[in-house]
Amino acid sequence: MKKIIALFLLLSSGLVSAQDNLNDYQYVIVPVKFDFLSSENLYRLSTIAKLNLTKLGFKVFYSNEQLPTEASSDRCDKLYLNIEKKPALLQTKLVLVLKDCQNKVIFEGEEGKSREKELAVAFPEALDKAFVSLRQKGYAYNGKVLTSVVVSNNSTSSVKEVVKTQPVSSPKIEESADYLFAQPIANGYQLVDKTPKIVLKIYKTSQPDYFTAQGDGINGALLKKNGEWVLEYYKNDQPVSEKLLIKF
């Protein structure tokens, strides 16, 4: 019994290790045709996958899409999506898999299932459910730059990490707290709550701890004071100052 428990713990730790680099990536490539389908975007599965990944905060492109300049320089700074169809009787089962440029599994989700008989209904329903475990895990790009490099002695490819300077999360963030996720956008971040809903957009300035801030009825600034993030703006001609818990 002890051997079984030890083996289970070893496998579990390996799974966590394989999945703990998800936040290193900001780009995902989605196939326009999955292996188990007969034609491109059948049942709109590619569209549904891209929509779900975009909602999570990834920058998503189809496999046949011309990439913008900032995303086209290196294939190893991207994740590659695959949807696997599992054998099942009277059910449709799909599993979400995200791999890196070396075909290493970075994330594998739980099965999404549907008992619908009509395939045009069953496949989209199963795929939406397959994304549940990824949404539960959560995602927030951590600012790393991943590039492929060539090792001269054997000419094999590897991945090198270069850490960007980025803002520091608020101290003592707890899962029960009403904190905001910072998701990268052009020239800044969007701050998203747990629903998820975009609460605020902040834009970089020449100072790393100072952002301009825009939101619903808010036009102000986000700055670091005594180690805490503080949002300052005017409401009804009166100055307002709010502390925010932010997870970058």
Image (spheres, grey):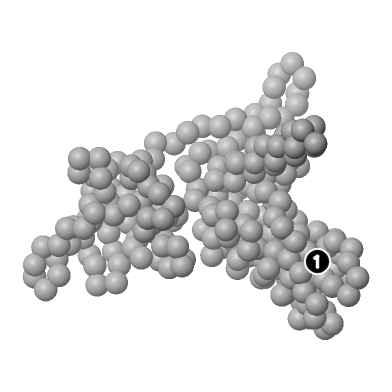
Q: Residue at x 75, y 26 (%)?
A: 156
Q: Position of residue 180 (x, y in %)?
A: 38, 57
Q: Residue furthest front?
A: 1
Tell me: 119 left or right of 229. Answer: right
For residue 126, which quarter of the picture? bottom right
Q: Residue at x 68, y 68 (%)?
A: 129
For residue 41, which quarter of the picture? bottom right
Q: Is residue 168 above or below residue 45?
A: above
Q: Position of residue 162 (x, y in %)?
A: 51, 32
Q: Residue furthest left?
A: 237
Query: How many discs mark residues in the rendered view?
Result: 1
Tell me: 43 left or right of 58. Answer: right
Q: Secondary structure at mark 1?
A: strand
For residue 103, which quarter of the picture? top right
Q: Residue at x 47, y 42 (%)?
A: 143
Q: Residue at x 10, y 63 (%)?
A: 239
Pick the quarter of the image with the N terminus: top right
Q: Is there any visible trace of residue 32 in the rendered image?
A: no
Q: Position of residue 59 (x, y in %)?
A: 55, 56
Q: Residue furthest bottom?
A: 118
Q: Is residue 44 above or below residue 75?
A: below
Q: Position of residue 34 (x, y in %)?
A: 80, 62
Name the kind of residue labelled 1 in the image: Lys
Q: Nearer the viewer, residue 37 or 241?
A: 241
Q: Is there any visible trace of residue 242 in the rendered image?
A: yes
Q: Nearer the viewer, residue 174 or 241?
A: 174
Tell me: 34 left or right of 176. Answer: right
The crowd level at tag 1 (other Cα within 10 Å; few <14, some 14-19, many 20+) is many
Q: Residue furthest top?
A: 153
Q: Is residue 48 above or below residue 172?
A: below
Tell me: 233 left or right of 3. Answer: left
- For label 1, the residue is 93
